[in-house]
Image (cartoon, rainbow, N blue to C red):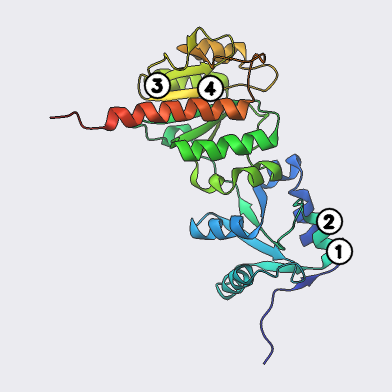
Amino acid sequence: MHEKKYPLLTDPRDTRFLTFRFLQTPQGRSRTELYLIEGIRHVAQAVEQKAPLQSVFYDPSVLSNRFGRKLVDRLLRRGMPGVRLSPQLYRQLTLAAEPQGLGAVMRQEWTRMEGLSITRNSLWLGIEAIESAGNLGTIIRTADAAGVAGIFLIGTDTDPWDPATVRASMGSLFSQKFIRCTAREFRDWSNARGVTVVGSSPKGLLSYRDFRCRWPVALLLGSEKEGLSDHLKEACDFMVRIPMVGRCDSVNVAVAAGVLLFEMSHQVSRTRRPSPG
Protein backbone atom coordinates (compact mmCIF):
# COMPACT_ATOMS: atom_id res chain seq x y z
CA MET A 1 0.00 0.00 0.00
CA HIS A 2 1.38 3.39 -0.99
CA GLU A 3 1.62 6.07 1.67
CA LYS A 4 -0.76 8.94 1.02
CA LYS A 5 1.04 12.16 0.07
CA TYR A 6 0.21 15.60 -1.19
CA PRO A 7 0.61 16.02 -4.98
CA LEU A 8 4.01 17.27 -6.17
CA LEU A 9 4.29 20.51 -8.17
CA THR A 10 7.29 20.96 -10.45
CA ASP A 11 5.95 23.22 -13.20
CA PRO A 12 6.19 26.99 -12.50
CA ARG A 13 3.21 27.49 -14.85
CA ASP A 14 0.93 25.33 -12.70
CA THR A 15 -2.07 27.43 -11.68
CA ARG A 16 -1.71 26.38 -8.05
CA PHE A 17 1.84 27.70 -7.91
CA LEU A 18 0.86 30.87 -9.78
CA THR A 19 -1.79 31.45 -7.11
CA PHE A 20 0.91 31.38 -4.42
CA ARG A 21 2.95 33.93 -6.36
CA PHE A 22 -0.15 36.09 -6.86
CA LEU A 23 -0.70 36.19 -3.11
CA GLN A 24 2.75 37.71 -2.67
CA THR A 25 1.38 40.88 -4.34
CA PRO A 26 -0.96 43.48 -2.82
CA GLN A 27 -3.34 43.04 -5.77
CA GLY A 28 -3.51 39.30 -5.24
CA ARG A 29 -4.28 39.62 -1.54
CA SER A 30 -6.89 42.30 -2.19
CA ARG A 31 -8.70 40.38 -4.93
CA THR A 32 -8.73 36.98 -3.26
CA GLU A 33 -8.94 38.03 0.42
CA LEU A 34 -6.27 35.40 1.08
CA TYR A 35 -2.65 35.66 2.26
CA LEU A 36 0.43 33.51 2.84
CA ILE A 37 2.18 32.50 6.02
CA GLU A 38 5.52 30.71 6.17
CA GLY A 39 7.37 28.82 8.87
CA ILE A 40 6.61 25.93 11.19
CA ARG A 41 5.75 28.17 14.14
CA HIS A 42 3.29 30.28 12.14
CA VAL A 43 1.47 27.26 10.70
CA ALA A 44 1.36 25.54 14.10
CA GLN A 45 -0.08 28.67 15.72
CA ALA A 46 -2.69 28.97 12.97
CA VAL A 47 -3.78 25.38 13.61
CA GLU A 48 -3.74 25.82 17.40
CA GLN A 49 -5.81 29.00 17.31
CA LYS A 50 -8.21 27.59 14.69
CA ALA A 51 -7.39 30.38 12.24
CA PRO A 52 -8.96 30.02 8.77
CA LEU A 53 -6.27 27.90 7.10
CA GLN A 54 -7.13 27.09 3.48
CA SER A 55 -4.24 24.91 2.28
CA VAL A 56 -0.59 24.05 2.98
CA PHE A 57 2.53 23.84 0.86
CA TYR A 58 5.92 22.39 1.72
CA ASP A 59 9.25 21.27 0.30
CA PRO A 60 10.18 17.81 1.67
CA SER A 61 13.86 18.45 0.99
CA VAL A 62 13.84 21.50 3.31
CA LEU A 63 11.29 20.42 5.92
CA SER A 64 13.65 18.39 8.11
CA ASN A 65 12.14 19.40 11.46
CA ARG A 66 10.38 16.42 13.05
CA PHE A 67 7.57 18.49 14.53
CA GLY A 68 6.99 20.19 11.16
CA ARG A 69 6.76 16.84 9.35
CA LYS A 70 4.29 15.53 11.94
CA LEU A 71 2.25 18.71 11.52
CA VAL A 72 2.01 18.15 7.76
CA ASP A 73 1.01 14.52 8.30
CA ARG A 74 -1.69 15.56 10.75
CA LEU A 75 -3.11 18.13 8.32
CA LEU A 76 -3.04 15.57 5.52
CA ARG A 77 -5.00 13.09 7.62
CA ARG A 78 -7.53 15.78 8.47
CA GLY A 79 -8.16 16.34 4.77
CA MET A 80 -6.52 19.77 4.55
CA PRO A 81 -5.75 20.61 0.89
CA GLY A 82 -2.07 21.00 0.07
CA VAL A 83 0.84 20.43 -2.29
CA ARG A 84 4.48 19.46 -2.21
CA LEU A 85 6.78 21.87 -4.02
CA SER A 86 9.96 21.01 -5.85
CA PRO A 87 13.08 22.72 -4.43
CA GLN A 88 13.17 25.03 -7.45
CA LEU A 89 9.59 26.20 -6.91
CA TYR A 90 9.98 26.59 -3.17
CA ARG A 91 13.06 28.76 -3.63
CA GLN A 92 10.99 31.06 -5.85
CA LEU A 93 8.31 31.33 -3.20
CA THR A 94 10.12 31.64 0.11
CA LEU A 95 11.06 35.02 1.56
CA ALA A 96 12.82 33.59 4.60
CA ALA A 97 16.57 33.95 5.06
CA GLU A 98 16.59 30.43 6.57
CA PRO A 99 13.56 28.64 5.06
CA GLN A 100 11.88 25.92 7.10
CA GLY A 101 10.10 24.34 4.16
CA LEU A 102 6.48 24.86 5.27
CA GLY A 103 3.83 27.47 4.58
CA ALA A 104 0.09 27.90 4.23
CA VAL A 105 -2.63 29.90 2.54
CA MET A 106 -4.91 31.72 4.98
CA ARG A 107 -8.20 33.55 4.62
CA GLN A 108 -8.17 37.17 5.76
CA GLU A 109 -10.40 37.92 8.73
CA TRP A 110 -11.95 41.37 9.13
CA THR A 111 -14.26 42.55 11.88
CA ARG A 112 -17.12 44.94 11.17
CA MET A 113 -17.37 48.05 13.34
CA GLU A 114 -21.00 47.24 14.10
CA GLY A 115 -19.99 43.95 15.68
CA LEU A 116 -17.42 45.35 18.12
CA SER A 117 -18.01 44.79 21.81
CA ILE A 118 -16.62 47.63 23.93
CA THR A 119 -15.95 47.04 27.58
CA ARG A 120 -15.39 49.79 30.12
CA ASN A 121 -11.61 49.34 30.39
CA SER A 122 -10.84 48.31 26.82
CA LEU A 123 -7.75 49.53 24.97
CA TRP A 124 -7.86 50.02 21.19
CA LEU A 125 -5.30 50.91 18.55
CA GLY A 126 -5.69 52.91 15.34
CA ILE A 127 -3.01 52.83 12.61
CA GLU A 128 -2.79 55.19 9.68
CA ALA A 129 -0.46 54.72 6.68
CA ILE A 130 2.41 52.81 8.31
CA GLU A 131 4.89 52.40 5.46
CA SER A 132 7.22 49.71 6.77
CA ALA A 133 5.78 46.19 6.79
CA GLY A 134 8.26 45.25 9.52
CA ASN A 135 7.12 48.14 11.70
CA LEU A 136 3.50 47.16 11.20
CA GLY A 137 4.13 43.55 12.14
CA THR A 138 6.04 44.60 15.25
CA ILE A 139 3.21 46.95 16.26
CA ILE A 140 0.65 44.15 15.84
CA ARG A 141 2.77 41.84 17.99
CA THR A 142 3.14 44.56 20.64
CA ALA A 143 -0.60 45.27 20.58
CA ASP A 144 -1.26 41.61 21.27
CA ALA A 145 1.18 41.63 24.18
CA ALA A 146 -0.36 44.80 25.65
CA GLY A 147 -3.91 43.43 25.56
CA VAL A 148 -5.32 45.60 22.76
CA ALA A 149 -8.96 44.70 22.03
CA GLY A 150 -8.80 45.51 18.32
CA ILE A 151 -6.78 47.32 15.67
CA PHE A 152 -8.31 49.90 13.32
CA LEU A 153 -6.53 50.16 9.97
CA ILE A 154 -7.52 53.63 8.87
CA GLY A 155 -7.44 54.26 5.13
CA THR A 156 -6.29 51.81 2.46
CA ASP A 157 -2.50 52.13 2.66
CA THR A 158 -1.81 49.66 5.48
CA ASP A 159 -1.75 45.94 4.66
CA PRO A 160 -1.55 43.58 7.67
CA TRP A 161 -1.37 40.57 5.33
CA ASP A 162 1.90 41.58 3.65
CA PRO A 163 4.38 38.64 3.98
CA ALA A 164 6.91 40.82 5.85
CA THR A 165 4.21 42.04 8.24
CA VAL A 166 2.99 38.50 8.84
CA ARG A 167 6.54 37.38 9.60
CA ALA A 168 7.24 40.27 12.02
CA SER A 169 3.94 39.73 13.85
CA MET A 170 5.14 36.29 15.00
CA GLY A 171 1.65 34.80 14.90
CA SER A 172 -0.16 37.65 16.64
CA LEU A 173 -2.31 38.14 13.54
CA PHE A 174 -4.38 35.14 14.55
CA SER A 175 -5.49 36.61 17.88
CA GLN A 176 -6.28 40.19 16.83
CA LYS A 177 -9.43 41.84 15.52
CA PHE A 178 -8.77 44.00 12.45
CA ILE A 179 -11.20 46.72 11.37
CA ARG A 180 -10.80 48.61 8.10
CA CYS A 181 -12.35 52.09 8.12
CA THR A 182 -11.98 55.71 7.04
CA ALA A 183 -10.93 58.53 9.33
CA ARG A 184 -14.52 59.77 9.50
CA GLU A 185 -15.86 56.32 10.34
CA PHE A 186 -13.34 56.00 13.15
CA ARG A 187 -14.23 59.43 14.50
CA ASP A 188 -17.97 58.63 14.40
CA TRP A 189 -17.38 55.28 16.11
CA SER A 190 -15.30 56.76 18.94
CA ASN A 191 -17.71 59.64 19.49
CA ALA A 192 -20.79 57.42 19.56
CA ARG A 193 -19.26 54.99 22.05
CA GLY A 194 -17.51 57.43 24.35
CA VAL A 195 -14.01 56.25 23.49
CA THR A 196 -11.21 58.64 24.47
CA VAL A 197 -8.87 59.10 21.50
CA VAL A 198 -5.18 59.73 22.16
CA GLY A 199 -2.81 60.69 19.37
CA SER A 200 0.95 60.28 19.38
CA SER A 201 3.17 63.10 18.13
CA PRO A 202 6.62 64.50 18.96
CA LYS A 203 4.80 67.85 19.25
CA GLY A 204 2.12 66.60 21.66
CA LEU A 205 1.31 68.94 24.53
CA LEU A 206 1.33 66.23 27.20
CA SER A 207 4.15 63.90 28.17
CA TYR A 208 2.85 60.34 28.17
CA ARG A 209 4.09 60.07 31.78
CA ASP A 210 1.71 62.83 32.88
CA PHE A 211 -1.29 61.59 30.92
CA ARG A 212 -4.03 59.69 32.74
CA CYS A 213 -6.36 57.66 30.54
CA ARG A 214 -10.10 57.97 30.50
CA TRP A 215 -11.51 54.58 29.58
CA PRO A 216 -12.25 53.09 27.13
CA VAL A 217 -9.34 54.54 25.13
CA ALA A 218 -7.86 54.31 21.63
CA LEU A 219 -4.28 55.18 20.71
CA LEU A 220 -3.69 56.56 17.21
CA LEU A 221 -0.39 56.18 15.36
CA GLY A 222 0.47 57.86 12.07
CA SER A 223 2.98 57.22 9.31
CA GLU A 224 6.72 57.19 9.94
CA LYS A 225 7.33 60.39 7.93
CA GLU A 226 4.15 62.45 8.21
CA GLY A 227 2.57 61.34 11.46
CA LEU A 228 -1.19 61.58 11.81
CA SER A 229 -3.25 63.28 9.14
CA ASP A 230 -5.15 66.46 10.01
CA HIS A 231 -8.44 64.52 9.92
CA LEU A 232 -7.26 62.18 12.65
CA LYS A 233 -5.62 64.91 14.70
CA GLU A 234 -9.04 66.54 14.87
CA ALA A 235 -10.48 63.27 16.18
CA CYS A 236 -8.03 63.20 19.11
CA ASP A 237 -9.04 64.29 22.59
CA PHE A 238 -5.37 64.44 23.63
CA MET A 239 -1.99 64.51 21.89
CA VAL A 240 0.87 62.97 23.85
CA ARG A 241 4.60 62.89 23.25
CA ILE A 242 7.49 60.73 24.41
CA PRO A 243 10.12 63.11 25.88
CA MET A 244 13.53 62.85 24.22
CA VAL A 245 16.68 63.07 26.34
CA GLY A 246 19.29 62.70 23.59
CA ARG A 247 19.73 64.62 20.36
CA CYS A 248 17.09 62.80 18.30
CA ASP A 249 13.65 64.40 18.10
CA SER A 250 11.58 61.21 17.79
CA VAL A 251 11.71 57.41 17.97
CA ASN A 252 10.68 54.69 15.55
CA VAL A 253 6.90 54.31 15.34
CA ALA A 254 7.05 50.69 16.50
CA VAL A 255 9.11 51.74 19.54
CA ALA A 256 6.62 54.52 20.26
CA ALA A 257 3.78 52.01 20.04
CA GLY A 258 5.48 49.81 22.62
CA VAL A 259 6.13 52.65 25.06
CA LEU A 260 2.61 54.07 24.85
CA LEU A 261 0.63 50.83 24.71
CA PHE A 262 2.37 49.36 27.73
CA GLU A 263 1.90 52.58 29.68
CA MET A 264 -1.81 52.48 28.87
CA SER A 265 -1.96 48.77 29.69
CA HIS A 266 -0.30 49.50 33.03
CA GLN A 267 -2.82 52.22 33.79
CA VAL A 268 -5.79 50.00 32.99
CA SER A 269 -4.38 47.20 35.16
CA ARG A 270 -4.26 49.65 38.07
CA THR A 271 -7.91 50.57 37.58
CA ARG A 272 -8.87 46.89 37.80
CA ARG A 273 -7.13 46.30 41.14
CA PRO A 274 -9.47 46.06 44.13
CA SER A 275 -9.14 48.93 46.55
CA PRO A 276 -7.41 48.07 49.88
CA GLY A 277 -9.52 47.35 52.88
Residue visible at 21% across and 32% down in the picture? 274
Work out whether residue 211 or residue 115 is closer to the camera in this orientation and state it. Answer: 211
The residue type indicated by label 1 comes to Gln
Neighbour tally class for label 1: few under 14, some 14-19, many 20 plus, Cα within 10 Å: few
**Mark 4 or mark 1, which has the lower sequence index?**
1
The residue furthest left is 277
In this rendering, the answer to whether 276 lies above or below 235 is below
Number of residue marks: 4
The residue type indicated by label 2 comes to Gln
Residue visible at 64% across and 43% down in the picture? 168
Q: Is residue 154 visible?
A: no
Closer to the camera: disc 4 or disc 3?
Answer: 4
Question: Whole-percent x and y of residue 136?
Answer: 63, 34
The residue type indicated by label 3 comes to Val
Q: Is residue 26 left or right of residue 204?
A: right
Query: What residue did someone put label 3 on?
Result: 195
Distance Cα–Cα, label 3 vs label 2 = 46 Å
Distance Cα–Cα, label 3 vs label 1 = 52 Å
Work out whether residue 224 or residue 46 is closer to the camera in this orientation and state it. Answer: 224
Mark 2 and mark 1 in contact (Cβ < 8 Å)? yes
Q: Is residue 165 left or right of residue 179?
A: right
**Mark 4 or mark 3, which has the lower sequence index?**
3
In this rendering, the answer to whether 45 lies above or below 242 is below
Query: What residue did someone put label 4 on?
Result: 220
The residue type indicated by label 4 comes to Leu
Work out whether residue 190 or residue 132 is closer to the camera in this orientation and state it. Answer: 132
